[in-house]
Structures are given as structure tokens and as C-alpha cells.
Amino acid sequence: VNAAMNDTSSAAGLSRQLIRLLLRRRERSDISASLRAKLRLHVADAVAIGWAATASPPLSQQLMDAMCLGVEGGACQVFGSDRRLPPSLAAFANAALIHALDFDDIHDISRLHPTAVTLPAALAAAQLTQAPMSRVLDAVTLGNELMCRLGAMLRPQGKGPGSDWFLTQLFGYFGAAFTAGVVMEQSEDQLVAGFGFAYMQAAGGKEAGFGVGCTGRSIYPAFSAMGGMIAAQLSQAGLTGPASALDGAANLFRLYLQGDPSEAQQAQLLDTEHWEFAATCIKPWPSCRLSHPYVAAGLALRQQLGGEGIEHLEVAVNGSAAKLCHPLAQRRRPETLQDAKYSVPYMTAYALVHGQVDLPGLRQEALSDPEVLALTDCISIVETLPDGPGHPPAQLQAITTSGKALRVTAPMDFDLDERGVQTKFIHCLAQAGLEDCAPAAWQALLSADALPDVALLMNPALAQPQGQRRQPE
């Protein structure tokens, strides 16, 4: 396999093969009506989350302060701001907003958030080229598919290749470059060059998640959205990046992921029938996906408790979830909201105390909630569950204040259907003061293919008749 990967002189290299495959699937109209409908839900979800994040100080203001330093104007809009920025900076800001609340979509087997990266790059490219929404949706579908395939090929777990990387960020450089390039109607050669420039920027070490006390974990997808947009701009201008980014002597997999992909992994990456993006889920709760089984288990245990208190709570985890439990003292007393959402002990306790996990409740003030903190002190962690790809199983064993023993295994059917996505969309826009236009914006985005441009995504109030529009406060 290694020799074959090095010998690209007689055949197209892996970057070109992958790009060609995705472009041909678009040309053959392989994007089914059901997949297109799913993509529209993911776009609507991402836009609403981005707008909700604009009402989350201080991060939203800090973002714009940072992006505007030394910058006077640009071609592209940012959610909730009157300022315009150059395309790469707008892609950064919008990606940061979409991920800031830890509410964006997730491909569980890949452990990555595709739309938070691809959509901001597509929005920036579309505003440069006045692209219609139909082309934007094509590009985001294919960019998401690219990212999900790269992640699914690895099937990351608690240890091993990919386990210490934010794969959203690492693979997002390629997803964003490709997405922006498709929106800009680049040639195959330009897209291959964009892959090369994506690789020249690729990063994404996971210390912002494993460590505690920083707010940077909430914006890591933004680096790849920005980098991908820069890659597309470079290739658009005629520069060429290395075509052998995925299979050369110093390729991505060798340097970052412990070795070249196997024949089976390459076959999965280049499969001509399967749509990996179809397995992407829309989050029900604004916290790290690996905490979701524990939120679900906490809600189920709360129902069994019937108001009785907890003396001790044993939380069983696997190798993946264990990384959200240590250092235990800081996971019990998170310093930042980002740390709280990445903490299995904290999110389990929060769900048990409040009976719901939503944006109005899970705010900075929740970090000092005395009931939640008291319950985190009752939690012990045992790493007894098997590790594997996807979100972890979760088991809780409680001893109540009356001495009763209760045991709960997390239900695994907590993802949102279309009605749930609609409810989430409306609640997110309400967070941004856009509740009046939310129903009309939802209906418009369900038919987004017909939109002439991306203006509605950047200002959902445009969905209402002009006399009824109210801008967010």
C-alpha cells in the first residue's frame, strides 16, 4: 500500500481521486432529494446557532474585536454584525459563532462537526461571487461528505490515530477549501491546489479540550474555515499547492495520523455509492457530544428519583469519555462555560438538578449553581465501559439519601427529528431577539434551493414582509 501511495506518476494522486469522485457525484445528480432535505435542516440549524451565539457575551464581542483589528471593511458579512470583513476573517468569525455554544451538528463515528466549517467558507465564497443558494448547498453537501469520509476512515476512539486531534479542525481545512472552491466554480486542478494549501496550514491539537481554564475550545473550527478560505483564494489566484498532500512522502496521514491509510481505508474513502454525511446528527443539547449520553442518563435517573436526593453517584465511562472527567477537581468546578460543557461530571449533575439542558439555563451563571456543585462532589468516576467509535455508552449508579440503589443505562435515541430541529431553530433565533421572524425564516430555509443568494442566512429578518421586519436588539 505504501509503495502504491508513493507512486503517483502513472495514476491520479489521492487528492485528485477524491476530488474527482465528489465532483462526479454532483455531475451525476447523486445527491438525492432526501439528502438535500437533510442538508437544508443542517444549514438552518447552523445559521440559527450562529445567530444565538451573537447574544452570548463576552465571546461574540471579543470575536469581532479581534477580527476587526487593523481591518477596514470587506466583502463579507458576519452573523449579527453591521461590520463587513475580508472573506477569510468572515469565515473565521461565522465558524466560531456556529461552534461557540457547542450546539452544532456532529458525525459521531468521525467525531467531527462538518457544517460549522463548510458553511462559513461557503458563505464567504458566495458573497465574493454572488453565488445562488443551490450552488452553496451543493458545495456544503460535498464538503461535509469529504470531512465525514476522512473521519469515518479513522473511526477515532479514546486512544490511537486521531484521538488527540480535533478532527473537525484537522480535516476542516480540506473541507473548507473544497467547499469554497466549488462555490467559486474552480477547476479540478484548482481544487487539488487548494488541498495542497489546506495541508500547508493543517493543525488542530486537542489540548484546548484536554486542558482546563481556556475559552479557545469554543472556536477551534474557525481556524480551518479561515484556512480553507485562504487556500481557495490562493488557488483561485493561480498559485499551486502540493498535489501529493494525502499521499506524498510527508503526507497528512504519515505526519499527523500514525501512518498511511490501509487499502480498506482508501476503498472507504473512495467509495462511489455511500453517503457518509447521511449519518450526521443535529444536537439536542448545547454541550460536548461525548457528554450527551450522560445528560440522557441523568434525565432518566431524575425521573426515577421522584424528588429524592442522592448520597453518592457512580458514573461509569469508557476511555473516550474518561478524557472529559480529568482532572476531576476541575471537571467538578469548571472555570469556564466551555469547560462545563466538556465535563461529564458537571453535565451529569446539571441534567439531574435542572431536568433540562438548554441555552437560557446553561450560561456563565450556572458555573456557581450550588445544587449542581454539591452534586458533582457526590460523583465518582469508574472507567469500566468498553471504548469504541461514536459517542460512549453511559451508566449511572446512584445511592439515594434513603439508601435506595438505582441504576440507569443511557438511552441512545436522543437525536432530533425534523420537528425537534424546527423547535431548536426557533429557540435559537429567539436567543438573538429574532423570534418574530423565526417561523418565516424556517419556511424559507426549507426551500433554500430557490434563494438567489445567501442574504437570508446572514439576516433572517429578510424572510418577513418589509413592513414587519424587526432587527435583533
Image: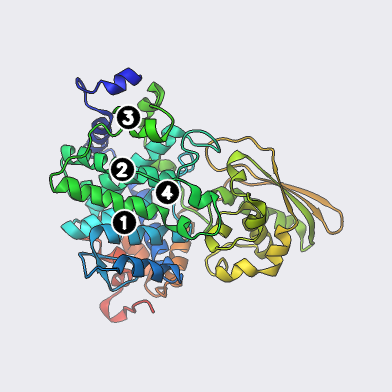
**Which mark's residue is nearer the viewer, 2 or 4?**
2
Q: Quadrant of the C terminus?
A: bottom left
How dense is the environment of label 1, judged by Cα within 10 Å: few (below 14), some, or many (20 and up)? Answer: many
Of 397 and 10, which appears nearest the observer?
A: 10
Residue at left offset 59%, top offset 49%: 324
Q: Which residue is mark 4?
A: 113
Q: Would residue 138 be seen by someone viewing this image from the given angle?
A: no
Q: Secondary structure at mark 3?
A: loop
Mark before the other along the chain sequence, 3 or 1: 1
Residue 345 position in % (x across, y down): 65, 54
Mark before the other along the chain sequence, 3 or 2: 2
Calculate the distance from the C-alpha at mark 3 to the C-alpha at mark 2: 15 Å
Residue 287 position in % (x across, y down): 53, 56
Residue at left offset 84%, top offset 59%: 401
Q: Would residue 403 be seen by someone viewing this image from the given angle?
A: yes
Residue at left offset 45%, top offset 71%: 58
Q: Secondary structure at mark 2?
A: helix
Tell me the amino acid under the disc marked 1: Pro
Calculate the distance from the C-alpha at mark 1 to the C-alpha at mark 2: 14 Å
Tell me the amino acid under the disc marked 4: His
Q: Which residue is mark 3?
A: 270
Q: Which residue is mark 1?
A: 120
Tell me the amino acid under the disc marked 2: Phe
How dense is the environment of label 3, judged by Cα within 10 Å: few (below 14), some, or many (20 and up)? Answer: some
- Relative horizontal placement of residue 393, taking residue 113 as reference (left or right): right
Q: Which mark is residue 307?
A: none
Calculate the distance from the C-alpha at mark 4 to the C-alpha at mark 3: 21 Å
Q: Which residue is mark 2?
A: 174
Of 344 and 278, which appears nearest the observer?
A: 344
